[in-house]
Amino acid sequence: MKKYLFMLLASVCMSANAQNEEFEPYYKYRIQLTDKKNNEYSLKHPEEFLSEKALQRRKKCKAKLNQTDLPVTKAYVEAISNTGVKVLLTSKWNNTVLVQVSDTSLISNVTALPFVSSARKVATYTKPPRVDKMAAVRKTILSAKSDTIAEGLPYGNATSQIVQLNGDKLHQQGFKGEGMTIAVVDAGFFNADIIPNLSGINILGTHDFVGGSDDIYAENSHGMMVLSCIGAKAQGIQVGTAPEASFWLLRSEDANSEQIVEEDYWCSAVEFADSVGVDVINASLGYVGFDDPADKIEYWQLDGKTHINSRSASMLASKGIILCNSAGNSGNDQWKLIGTPADASDILAVGAVDESGKNTVFSSIGNVMGSRIKPDVCAQGGASGVMGVTGKTSKANGTSFSSPILTGMVACLWQALPNLNAYQIMDLVRKSGNNAEHPDNIYGHGIPDFQKALELGKKLK
């Protein structure tokens, strides 16, 4: 199963010609550290490793700093690097280091270090990666034809998905996401910077956690389509659910393979989002299986803490951030259930319904380990209005789109109720669902009514 959860497009790729060059296999390992002793940072001076915006968000939400917020001890990272491995990323919340080697015998030198508790292989590369040709057609693929403005439908292609959530009512009151920062964690944002109907979106910055890319706008188109559901502001053509929000675009998905290392990329991405002060994260990504059968996810592991990305997802609300994550598209498959990190606690896992409010056959279902309801809520993921790869509007299926549609409305609700914390906002979203009185493992709490959520929120002190 592709981890970016949509059912429309795939990047055009080709195999590299391995006959003309020698390729040396390489591997990636997750190194688990024992502690953060001798750390050069202190919780007394968080301004040294968190932005002012991040600290303001923590203060507003009364989210306390703890040891997970401290960066990985620099001396430990340097000692690991000195063994001959290449250090790629760290995760401060999980206290791990991601490394790359061609000679796997070097890992024994790493595990011999006194502050290393374990090493797990998370990726294997035995042949050259596919070469993505999207960059070569980055500008020429844009359609010369423009969309016709839909008279009487200010949201254009996105009308039904916004009205279904009563999102137009919040917009009419001036709550369109202004002052809120959203991170979109995805596979790539092909042409998002030059598609005319996406112009005007306030992009604060981008970051690639996969590596090897110098232009996330030349990567996979999935993130661009997701972004269009939230941030587009082309009146009468495509308008997102939070068109006045600001955005960070973060790449954590490697479309070339299905390997568990992408959990590590994801963790680093959401930690970065925290550090720059993001309020809401959308992740239209999920994990239910990998290339290596030994890494397959078992039903019992859907507990919100077994997998590293689920552990990180479960921490986000305590740090003042709301995560909206696609439930998955396995409802019609043998697996059927959600994946990780949609199983996490204290997030909004988003299922998919069609325009009429009926569940789609592909939307993943619960249950998960414990008494938690999954998915939490639903939004339109059947025939969702999105921006297509040519720059023209189109329709697409997937919880990849129900999640960002909801994400934008969550940001608008939080803008309207700035004194509430992440837990309270998510609780309002659940309570406003049309299935809130009897939530189940298909609809969760149902389709939220954001006007109702706003009214409920005004009653809270």
Image (cartoon, rainbow, N blue to C red):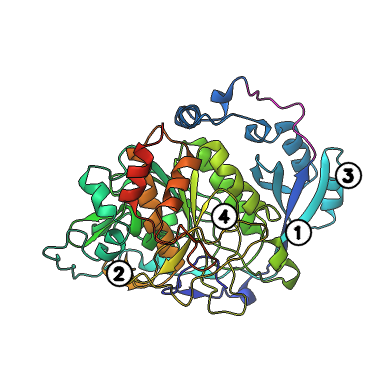
Depth order, front residue of 121/424 = 424
Q: Secondary structure at mark 3?
A: loop
Span shown in magenta = 34-43
The kind of residue tagged 4 is Val
Q: Which residue is mark 1?
A: 121
Whether residue 24 appears in this view of the structure is no
Cα separation between marks 2 and 1: 39 Å
Label 2 near label 4: C-beta < 8 Å? no
Of the two numbered discs 4 and 2 on the same chain, state the one appearing first in sequence. 4
Of the two numbered discs 2 and 1 on the same chain, state the one appearing first in sequence. 1
The residue at the far front in this view is 437
Q: Secondary structure at mark 1?
A: strand
Q: Residue at x 55, y 37 (%)?
A: 319
Cα separation between marks 4 and 2: 25 Å
Label 3 near label 4: C-beta < 8 Å? no
Q: Which residue is mark 2?
A: 390
